[in-house]
Amino acid sequence: MIDYEVLRVIWWALLGVLLIGFALTDGYDLGVAALLPWIAKKDAERRMVINTVGPTWEGNQVWFILGGGAIFAAWPFVYAVSFSGFYLAMFVVLAALILRPVGFKYRSKRSDPAWRTRWDWALFVGGLVPALVFGVAVGNVLSGAPFRLDSDLRAFYEGSFFALFTPFTLLCGLLSVTMLALHGAAWIQMKTEYGAVRDRARRLGLAAGALSILLFAGGWGAIAYGKYGFVMVSPFDPLAPSNPLRTTSMAAPGAWLANYGVHPWMMIAPFLGFGGTALAMFGMWRGREAPAFAGSSGAAAGIIATVGLSMFPFILPSSIDPHSSLTVWNASSSAKTLGIMVVVTLIFLPLVLAYTAWAFKIMFGRVTSQEAVSNPDFY
């Protein structure tokens, strides 16, 4: 039987895996949509770009659902505080995501250019806004959310929607946008015919990669020299039942980098973030699709892993009452719940991965503008 401490770490790692899985799959969908108005000028080009993600975008959203479900089941305190405190931000994301299925389904129902242009911009909003808000949310997690817990473990959120947008959180949001735009550009290069669309995707991908490196370095510098970071200052028992009020934490600027000194192997994550971006840019520059997509995938995985490894064991720190901060050790479900979920995950996650790999294999290949116009099954 796996002990409680290990189960908590396993589910912290699985949460990261699910977030990375979402970024690697639905991330390129969002990136393609955010690039759509700029890389496809004619209707045939836009239909070609849309249909590079047409067969897979719905399945890719499974990772988003799995991530939310994992937070709900494994980290109920985190789910309660984050989904209630960030309610308006979540509503904006969901409203933007709703535009995607409507845009995909209705865009080509009429041949009117104005009709199609409006839906193209709806798809653009459905790609850009979630990418931006997800990054802003990560920035707020790094800087601490304005919540507190009372003696009955009731959560009180004392922030506002517009307070979520600070210079640091906007930097994180822009990094998320450029990271996914790079991923989307790499996907377009791999999935479209040679021509103007690929050339535009190459140019925009190189620009997105350069901005990603600058923003990632800027975020690293802000964390190193800014006011961001928290530490636990009280003894804790990793085998004890979850109770956020049993641990004591405090703000400690620069503390998010402490883990790298204690565990140097963690530097793999930021190196992967920078190196993957550089590899993606090299692949685009040389016209090599596989290195470009592998690099953009590695960049997304590295950047997300950097956040999780930097914060460990914190999951959601509090900026107004650090003692209410939620960590791996004080905010999880019971050992029995985590154990049952591990068994379920070991059964079903390989099935999801196998089906995803099979679906991608079946639908692998380039989309041409001629096929996009003539195939009645295309969007």
Image (spheres, rainbow, N blue to C red):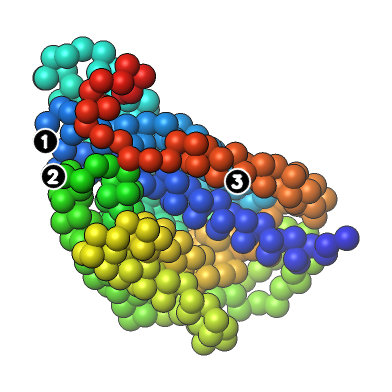
Res. 103 in view = yes
Tag of residue 353? 3
Q: How far apart are marks 1 and 2 (CA)?
A: 9 Å
Residue at position x 73%, y 58% from top?
Answer: 242
Instruction: Quickly name the residue at label 2.
Output: 196
Q: Is residue 9 left or right of residue 228?
A: right
Residue at position x 44%, y 66% from top?
Answer: 302
- Residue 201 locus on image (x, y percent): 20, 50
Instruction: Quickly name the residue at label 1.
Output: 41
- Residue 134 locus on image (x, y percent): 38, 49
Q: Do the residues labelled 1 and 2 touch (CB within 8 Å)?
A: yes
Q: Are marks 3 and 2 in contact (CB under 8 Å)?
A: no
Where disc 1 sits, the SS reads: loop
When asked about the image quadrant of residue 365, the answer is: top left
Packing grade of label 1 (10 A; few <14, some 14-19, many >=20) is few
Residue at position x 40%, y 60% from top?
Answer: 294
In this rendering, which labeled residue sits more in front, label 3 or label 2? 2
Residue at position x 30%, y 74% from top?
Answer: 217
| Between 228 and 29, the one nearer to me in the picture | 29
Res. 253 in view = no
Q: Is residue 10 left or right of residue 259?
A: right
Q: Residue furthest bottom?
A: 261
Type of amino acid under label 1: Lys
Q: In which quarter of the image is the C terminus?
A: top left
- Residue 343 locus on image (x, y percent): 78, 48
When asked about the image quadrant of residue 221, the answer is: bottom left
Q: Which of marks 1 and 3 is nearer the N terminus?
A: 1
